[in-house]
Image: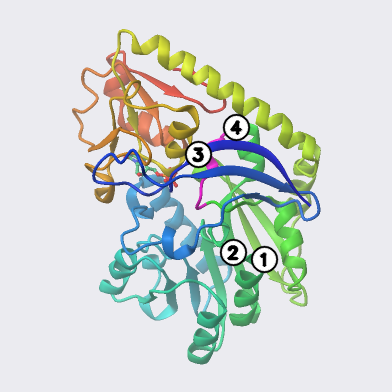
Amino acid sequence: MNKKFLDLGFQPLANEYLNYYNKKQKKYNLKIFFNTKNKLVSISERMSSKKMFTNNYPYRSSMSKTMKSSFKNLSKTIIKKFNPYLLLEIGSNDGALITNFSKKKVVGIEPCLNLAKITKKKGYTTYNEYWDFNLSKKLRNKFKAFDLIYSANTLTHISNLEDVFKSIDNVLSEKGILIIEDPSLLECIKKNSYDQFYNEHIYLFSALSVRNLLEKFSLEIFDIKNLETHGGSLRYYIKRKENKNFKISSRVNMQIQKELRYGLNKYLTYKKFSKRVQNSKRLLLKILKKLKKNSKIIGYGATAKATTILNYCRIDNNYIDFFVDTTPEKINKFMPGKNIKIIKYNKKVLNKIDYVFLGAWNFKREILKKERKYIKNGGKFITHVPFPKIF
Ligand code: TYD
């Protein structure tokens, strides 16, 4: 049974950056549910993929050094551990992973035309399509099977998980390995990072829920890695149950136990989280109100996550003057639902700024390193993770 535990108010599409401030930008009520049976956490609203993943999608994996090097390291691990003959990436974005492989050995799936074009132009086979069973049939006819399927931050964006795994099952070779990675529900709850919830994140996975989802397809997790990316993610290594080539690592049970100890199987845990989220909103607004009186505050990293915060906490240009970001697709546009402009990042942009709200808190380390001078000159940051504070 799906039980509601959190209401994040009326929200626009998190990545719908418009050229002008539109007071009437379409919004929906973002509510979060916990399924007491399969332990899956999901959002109320299911937008169609076509509406969310358009031909001008603004998210680029290669925009941060952290993500680029994470994909590079992963490609080395994949080659060393599994040495795949043919790799399929579902959601290949701008090619941050596949471009680390030889062109003959990878196939990318990317529904957003602006992104698919980037890898196509570099000579990588890229299907500009949504991941579904029809596409898997097409791939099966052409390539027979893939011995490695990888997907990061994509499967949680697709509403029909049954079709997602059925399609994977259709093209994964007998001894094939499936690697998926997505933000970790446990980390989200622990860090109070409720901004992980927005229209594109239809699900927030845990090892508990992934294990349940795979059961039907005779697939099982044989290893798990905790990652720092996206504010704390889990990488799941999955195989067919009949494949005895890999032993199940003790890390799998360790993660499951950790999640159970934290109560991810209990509705009460989520109700408590919901209370903490409401407190977080109050505290963040208190900080901003106090600071705004005699200082200049801007936002850093026009993330989809920030859309959730701004719209839930009702933060507008009365608190934050503008956001800075490096993504070309976001420049000179407005934060979804809010009258806050996004301007192009440059080194001098933080001069004369007193406080910087970290929209991209998940890149805190990278950003603090980059902004050493700002910090040295007395500049301060504001974050809401794990609770609203100035540092
Ligand atoms: P991310 O947190 O990955 O995204 P989302 O919540 O949208 O899934 O996005 C990080 C954003 O921050 C992206 O728009 C790029 C921007 N950014 C900068 O502008 N400068 C930086 O130094 C870093 C690391 C990110």
Q: Which residue is mark 2?
A: 179
Q: Which mark is residue 191?
A: 4
* Residue that numbered label 1 is attached to: 238
In depth, the one of 209 and 277 nearer the eye is: 277
Q: Is residue 18 left or right of residue 74?
A: left
Q: Amino acid at mark 2?
A: Ile
Mark 4 to mark 3: distance in Å? 23 Å
Range of residues picked out in magenta: 191-200
- Secondary structure at badge 1 equals strand
Local crowd size for mark 1, using a 10 Å CA cut-off: few (<14), some (14–19), many (≥20): many
Q: Mark 1 or 4, which is nearer the eye?
A: 4
Name the kind of residue labelled 1 in the image: Ile
Badge nearest the viewer, 4 or 3: 3
Label 2, secondary structure: give it: strand
Question: Is the CB of the residue bearing disc 4 within 8 angstroms of ligand 1?
Answer: no
Q: Which SS class for mark 4?
A: helix
Q: Nearer the viewer, mark 3 or mark 2?
A: 3
Q: Quadrant of ligand 1?
A: top left
In primary-sequence order, the first of circles 2 and 1 is 2
